Image (cartoon, rainbow, N blue to C red):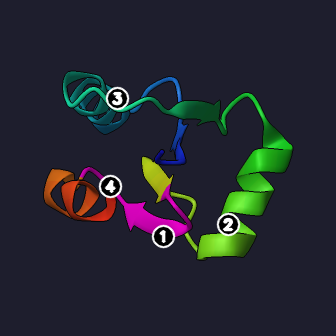
């Protein structure tokens, strides 16, 4: 089973597109809103070097931005 975590904010239209894409693909995911969770935001930056969203962690691999092709390649 895929471990998918999506890091989002309230105002990010690409985050909405990404969540819709994952749902359409039948992929379950955990969402972390870095706007509401400062510790998660700090961890995201220290892990990836980027604050921009969406960022998606799939089975330990990171995808920056809305990138359906890369996501499809990473899911099992």
Q: Earlier in the sequence, mark 4 or mark 1?
A: 1
Q: Nearer the viewer, residue 63 or 3?
A: 3
Q: In the image as oriented, which residue stretches furthest toward the left?
A: 69
Would residue 44 be found to the left or right of residue 3 on screen? right
The residue that label 1 is drawn on is 61
Would residue 53 be found to the left or right of residue 25 on screen? right
Q: Earlier in the sequence, mark 3 or mark 4?
A: 3
Q: Earlier in the sequence, mark 2 or mark 3?
A: 3
Q: Nearer the viewer, residue 8 or 22?
A: 22
How far separated are the C-alphas under marks 2 and 1? 15 Å
Instruction: Say which quarter of the image contains residue 38.
Output: top right
Q: Which mark is residue 21?
A: none
Magenta stretch, residue numbers? 58-66
Instruction: Say which quarter of the image contains residue 26.
Output: top left
Foreground label between 2 and 3:
3
Foreground label between 3 and 4:
4
Q: Earlier in the sequence, mark 4 or mark 2?
A: 2
Q: Which mark is residue 45?
A: 2
């Amino acid at each position: 089973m895929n471990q998918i975590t999506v890091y989002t904010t309230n105002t990010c239209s690409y985050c909405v597109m990404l969540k819709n894409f994952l749902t359409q693909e039948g992929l379950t995911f955990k969402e972390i809103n870095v706007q509401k969770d400062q510790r998660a935001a700090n961890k995201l930056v220290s892990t990836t070097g980027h604050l921009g969203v969406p960022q998606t962690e799939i089975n330990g691999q990171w995808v920056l931005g809305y990138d359906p092709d890369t996501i499809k390649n990473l899911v099992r």
